Image (cartoon, rainbow, N blue to C red):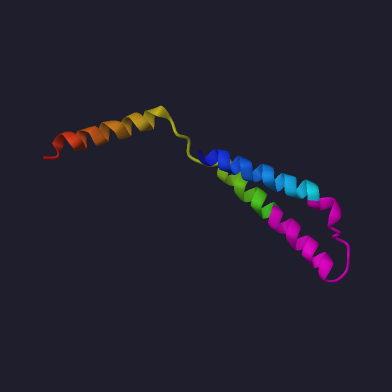
Amino acid sequence: MNKNRYLLCLLVCGLLLYYAAPRLDVFNGGLAGIFAISWLVFALIVIAGNLTALLYSPKNTTRHIKIKEKVTNKKRARSF
């Protein structure tokens, strides 16, 4: 479920970059140039964070789920 969210965030960020990058003038002087550079830096941070979360998220395998089920079944059998 989390991987879908990370992928959606990456797609939305890519869409925002596609829309905003031609309109941002990085070489403009003053406050407009600072805004454009900071906006692009924050967009790159969002992309890097979501890619990191997507690539390094723990994998849910059925083996781990079966082990957890066995542990919970043993706990339930022992409780009085």
Residue at 70% across, 54% down: 43
Vertical position of residue 25 compared to residue 3: above or below: below
Residue 26: image location, x then y, percent: 85, 60
Q: In this view, does 70 lie above or below 29?
A: above
Find the residue positioned furthest to the bottom. 30
Magenta residues: mostly which secondary structure? helix
Q: Which region of the structure is painted magenta?
A: 20-43
- Would residue 27 appear left or right of 36 to someone viewing this image? right
Residue pushed farthest left?
80
- For residue 66, what is the image quadrant? top left
Give the position of the C terminus as an image quadrant. top left
Residue in the image at 74% along x and 62% along y: 38
Residue 45, horizontal then vertical, whole percent: 66, 54
Is residue 64 in the magenta section? no
Identify the residue at image location x=72%, y=45%. Answer: 14
Horizontal relation, residue 19 to residue 66: left or right: right
Whether 37 is among the magenta residues is yes
Q: Where is residue 27 in the image (x, y as percent from the top left)?
A: 88, 62
